[in-house]
Image: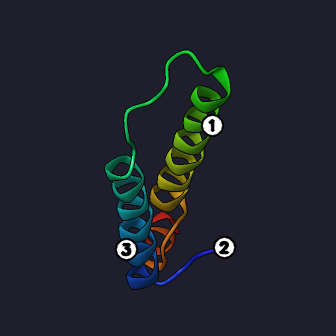
């Protein structure tokens, strides 16, 4: 499915800003608590997957260029 370029750009900005906000809100992590560590890793993985998805989904322009 293709999306207009403006929509894809907005999704990219939202994904990147969500990752920045998450990192900005991280306080000192208790490295002796594996549950906290796993939680941070899962959150980071989810944010990275969102960023990748926002940058790999086709736009109207890229779809038109491949035809």
Residue picked out by circle 1: 39
- The residue closer to the viewer here, 5 or 45, is 45
* Residue identified by numbered label 3: 9
**Residue 15's x, y, as percent?**
44, 62
Does dot 3 land on a helix, a strand or a loop?
helix
- Label 2 element class: loop
Depicted 33 relative to depicted 10: above or below: above
Nearer the camera: disc 2 or disc 3: 3
What x and y, as percent, mark residue 58?
A: 52, 66
Circle 1 residues within 10 Å: few <14, some 14–19, many ≥20: few
Determine whether the residue tagged by mark 1 lies in a helix, strand or loop: helix
State the quadrant of the N terminus: bottom right
| Residue visible at 39% across and 77% down in the picture | 10
Mark 2 nearby-residue class (10 Å; few <14, some 14–19, many ≥20): few
Q: Which mark is residue 1?
A: 2
Of circles 2 and 1, which is in front?
Answer: 1
Q: Residue 30: percent from the left, percent from the top?
A: 49, 25
Residue at x 33% of width, y 54% of height: 20
Ranked by sequence position, the earlier of labels 2 and 1 is 2
Question: Which residue sits at x=52%, y=41%?
Answer: 44
| Of residues 12 and 14, the one drawn nearer to the viewer in this rendering | 14
Q: Is residue 8 left or right of residue 57?
A: left
Badge 3, how many Cα within 10 Å: few under 14, some, many 20+?
A: some
Task: Please state which of residues 29 and 6 is positioned toward the viewer in this rendering.
Answer: 29
- Which residue appears at 50% of the width and 18% of the height? 31
Disc marking residue 22? none
20 above or below 64? Answer: above
């Amino acid at each position: 499915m293709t999306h207009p370029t403006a929509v894809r750009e907005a999704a990219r900005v939202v994904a990147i800003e969500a990752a920045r906000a998450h990192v900005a809100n991280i306080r000192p992590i208790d490295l002796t608590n594996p549950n906290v560590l796993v939680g941070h890793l899962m959150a980071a993985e989810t944010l990275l997957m969102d960023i990748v998805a926002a940058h790999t989904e086709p736009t109207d322009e890229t779809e038109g260029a491949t035809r």
